[in-house]
Structure formats: C-alpha cells, structure tokens
Amino acid sequence: MDKRIIAVLTLSAALIGGIVSTSSQPAAASSKWHTGMPKALRGYWHTKSNTLSISSKHVYVLLRHSGASASKVKKVQYKYLGKHTYTYKQYWKSGGSYSNKITLSKSGHSLKFGGIKTSFTRGR
C-alpha cells in the first residue's frame, strides 16, 4: 500500500513539475524562415540621401549619387528576431545572396536598416 501511494505522489509531482516548467518559458522569437517580407515593413522608406524599397519579393536600397545598379532577385526570406527586429536573406538570380537586419520603431513610422546610421521614415 505504501509503495502505491509513493508511486502516485511521485508521478503527480513529475506531471505538475512538467506542466509548470513548460508553461513558464517565455515566448521565443520565430526560428522559422518565412518567404517574402512582412507587411509591416513593405513600402518606401527614405532618408535625405537614400531610399529603401521593400516589397514581398525584394529589398532595394537606392543610394542617390552612387550609380549602383540593382540585381534581379530570385527569392527573399525573413525571420522575426523579437522586439520589432527582423533579419532577411535575399538571393539573386545570377547567384549569391545577401543578408541584413531591419528594426522597426514601435510607432511604425521609422526603421533602422543594417549599417546605415540614419533612421528611414515611411513615404516617398
């Protein structure tokens, strides 16, 4: 009889401990790569000298006065890192890839892009 009570108490403690340990874990950022770009980031963003164009199929940084050309994009993927921050990968049709990080402000009206110090604001 005592062995049965000890077994039931041990099993109950293990079940309760397992439920508590799984329910108290914080929600993690998405570890999955998604195709396209999130709707919150899509559109035109600009600074005084740069324009950032984000659609579901590409991310282009248009630098005024640079003469740089844009390559054709084959695929774009993104991952949510948490705290309004995303990382993305862009694959070109000619081969190769590029990745960078984008942070959207809480108000949704400005964002930080990779190695550019100035914040981009929404609009043309």
Image: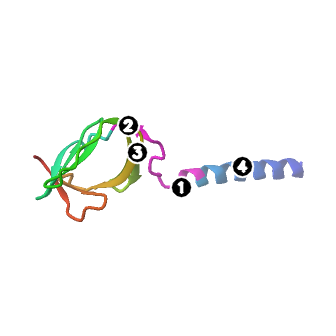
Which mark lies nearer to you, 1 or 4? Answer: 1
Amino acid type, label 1: Ser
**Pointer 4: what residue?**
12
Numbered mark located on residue 97 in the image: 3
Amino acid type, label 2: Ser
Dot placed on the residue nearer the N-terminal end, 3 or 1: 1
Amino acid type, label 4: Ser
Q: Where is residue 37 in the image (x, y as percent from the top left)?
A: 32, 40
| 44 relative to 26 in the view: left or right | left
Q: Where is residue 10 in the image (x, y as percent from the top left)?
A: 77, 52
> Could you tell me how far apart the alpha carbons at marks 1 and 4 are, in whole angstroms?
18 Å
Which mark lies nearer to you, 2 or 3? Answer: 2
Question: Label 1 crowding class (10 Å Cα cut-off): few <14, some 14-19, many 20+?
Answer: few
Residue furthest to the bottom in view is 117
> Could you tell me how far apart the alpha carbons at marks 2 and 4 are, in whole angstroms?
60 Å
**Pointer 2: what residue?**
94
Q: Is mark 2 on a helix, strand or loop?
A: loop
Q: Which is nearer the eye, 17 or 28?
A: 28
The stretch of residues the image draws in magenta is 22-36
Numbered mark located on residue 24 in the image: 1
Queried whether the magenta region covers residue 32, the answer comes back as yes
Question: Label 4 crowding class (10 Å Cα cut-off): few <14, some 14-19, many 20+?
Answer: few
Residue at the image point whose x is 44% and y is 41% from the top: 33
Which mark lies nearer to you, 3 or 1? Answer: 3
Magenta span main SS = loop
> Could you tell me how far apart the alpha carbons at marks 2 and 3 are, in whole angstroms?
9 Å
Queried whether the magenta region covers residue 37, the answer comes back as no
Question: Label 2 crowding class (10 Å Cα cut-off): few <14, some 14-19, many 20+?
Answer: few
Q: What element carries label 4?
A: helix
Residue at the image point whose x is 88% and y is 52% from the top: 2
